[in-house]
């Protein structure tokens, strides 16, 4: 049973990594060149928008973090079951729960801010006299939309992973006494 | 001890409500009128920016949700301790854990998108030829900045609350067997 949960977590982490990496790749390799006036060309890349730059860095970092967690998982696959009530196990579980939470909130926040920036590019703003950008660079905008969708899927997967980490650490506590471990 | 945790949760919820309500109030009552050209006046309100409108609605809803949770808390203060291993208790705990998670992610996301929108208003965008707005409506922008800060504090408080809800539901499970309750 323990094994089944570990398998589920590995599966979730691997799919989160896939979605994060595809987000990063789509954003990084998305370029479109259009003629603006006569011979003047303009090239749209992710560098034009700070939100996309940050999205690229954060998704790469999150993918790396999940990769590290997978490595840790495969190294400690045997040892965690043996030293169950160990304080080392509890510390590691707490740390990975907190890190999971931080990574999922960070990814979610950067993705949402990229989404907001793209919404501005799509619709412009009448009150601020900002013009639309996406009617010129249509393909670029569609690709970024795909990247944001991928990143939202990755965020949901990571939220599920963080629930699993919470389960792993919090079930060690006694249901009767406050913040007391079960074995004691 | 159980009582101390309940007191902590109530305290966290009350302060989250205070921060959420103050965010909503600051956003709703923030207006600034400036003369643009000669006699033409322009008034800046939260209605100029969709992100601020959504922030107002979401923070109000989140404050209402936390208020309802407080009511539930005070009604069931005695009954939860009695029927500890009850399946009703478990269902309620799971539901309030999931709702807490949804509310905190939603609040965090809308606040981050408002932050991104304000960043655009503050700096403009050279690549997109969008002009700055905040150099005209300075006081308005400062107030919105304060609202966003309040909302981030509320988000952190609610993230802590959702950890407490997770603790309340997940410590009921057995540390040895997968997804099995402790009493069985």
Image: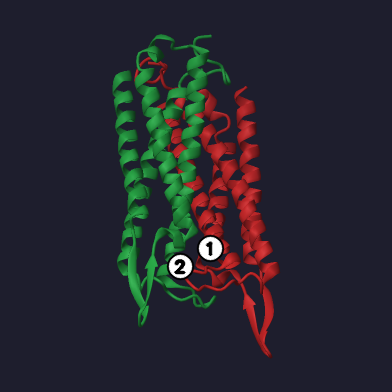
Chain colours: A green, B red
Q: Residue furthest right?
A: B139
Q: Residue at x 57, y 61 (%)?
A: B119
Marks 2/1 in contact by CB < 8 Å: the verdict is yes
Give residue A27's position: percent from left, percent from top: 36, 54
| Residue appearing at x 54%, y 51% in the figure | B62
The residue under label 2 is A120
In the displayed image of the protein, which residue is found farthest to the bottom? B39
- Do pointers 2 and 1 mark residues of a single chain? no
Percent across and percent down for residue B106 are 48, 51
Quick check: B131 above or below A154? below
Quadrant into which the N terminus of chain B falls:
top right
Q: Which of A18/B148 is in front?
A: A18
Q: Secondary structure at mark 1?
A: helix
Q: In the image, is A7 to the left or to the right of B78? A: left
Is B59 rendered above or below residue A159? below
Q: What residue is pinned by disc 1? A: B117
Residue A65, picture quadrant: top left
Q: Residues within 10 Å of mark 1 (few under 14, many from 20)?
A: many
In the figure, is residue B180 to the left or right of A127?
A: left
Q: Position of residue B17 (x, y in %)?
A: 62, 48
Which sits in the foreground, B150 or B79?
B150
């Amino acid at each position: 049973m323990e094994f089944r949960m570990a398998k589920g977590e590995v599966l979730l982490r691997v799919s989160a990594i896939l979605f994060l990496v595809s987000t990063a790749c789509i954003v990084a390799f998305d370029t479109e060149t259009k003629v603006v006036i006569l011979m003047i060309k303009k090239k749209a890349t992710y560098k034009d928008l700070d939100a996309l730059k940050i999205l690229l860095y954060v998704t790469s970092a999150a993918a790396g973090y999940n990769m590290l967690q997978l490595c840790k998982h495969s190294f400690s696959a045997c040892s965690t079951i043996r030293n169950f009530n160990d304080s080392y196990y509890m510390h590691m579980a707490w740390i990975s729960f907190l890190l999971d939470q931080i990574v999922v909130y960070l990814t979610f926040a950067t993705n949402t801010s990229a989404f907001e920036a793209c919404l501005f590019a799509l619709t412009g703003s009448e009150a601020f006299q900002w013009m639309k950008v996406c009617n010129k660079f249509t393909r670029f905008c569609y690709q970024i939309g795909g990247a944001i969708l991928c990143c939202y899927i990755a965020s949901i997967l990571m939220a599920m992973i963080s629930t699993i980490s919470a389960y792993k650490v919090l079930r060690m506590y006694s249901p009767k006494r406050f913040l007391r471990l079960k074995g004691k």
